[in-house]
Image (cartoon, rainbow, N blue to C red):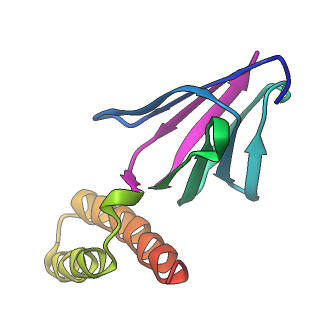
């Protein structure tokens, strides 16, 4: 690692999930995964649902699944804001499948267009999560 450090904050509306000095973070960008290392060029971009891998010193990894969000990198500081997040210790494909099934039932019964839009957004994220978890088998 260079003499410079990379500071990372990973937050959702409900909770701060990670804050600290890291070696690297791999993020699910709109156009594909990308890595942020110390001295990364300034950038602000959207994130798609997918896997975030945080690598601390001595290759200690933290893995999360996130919904949409955005990232801002500037002056060795990386801020990641997401609307949905699960840490690897909470990964359970059966529970995710059950949540998706329950949500599909709710969607079929929903008549309010505003509520339906919200449910469809949640459905997209859960489908991505299930697909992600299946790919990890």
Q: Is residue 81 left or right of residue 8?
A: left
Q: Position of residue 32 (x, y in %)?
A: 74, 60
Q: Position of residue 104 (x, y in %)?
A: 25, 81
Q: What span is in magenta?
A: 66-87
Q: Position of residue 123 (x, y in %)?
A: 35, 71
The question of residue 46 being in magenta is answered with no
Q: Residue at x 26, y 66 (%)?
A: 116
The question of residue 72 being in magenta is answered with yes
Residue closer to the observer: 17 or 107: 17
Q: Residue at x 38, y 50 (%)?
A: 84
Tag count: 0
Q: Is residue 51 left or right of residue 59?
A: left
Residue closer to the observer: 98 or 108: 98
Q: Residue at x 49, y 79 (%)?
A: 131
Q: Residue at x 29, y 74 (%)?
A: 96
User: What is the quadrant of residue 1 in the picture?
Assistant: top right
User: What is the quadrant of residue 56 in the picture?
Assistant: top right
Kindly give the residue lying farthest to the front in the view shown.
58
């Amino acid at each position: 690692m260079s003499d410079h450090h990379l500071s990372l904050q990973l937050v959702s509306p409900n909770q701060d999930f990670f804050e600290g000095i890291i070696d690297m973070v791999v993020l699910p960008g709109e156009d594909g995964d990308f890595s942020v290392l110390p001295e990364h060029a300034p950038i602000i971009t959207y994130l798609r649902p997918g896997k975030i891998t945080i690598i601390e010193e001595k290759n200690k990894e933290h893995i999360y699944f996130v919904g949409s969000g955005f990232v801002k990198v500037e002056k060795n500081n990386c801020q990641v804001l997401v609307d949905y997040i699960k840490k690897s210790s909470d990964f359970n494909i059966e529970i995710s499948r059950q949540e998706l099934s329950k949500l599909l039932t709710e969607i079929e019964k929903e008549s309010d267009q505003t509520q339906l839009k919200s449910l469809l957004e949640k459905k997209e994220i859960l489908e991505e999560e299930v697909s992600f978890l299946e790919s990890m088998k």
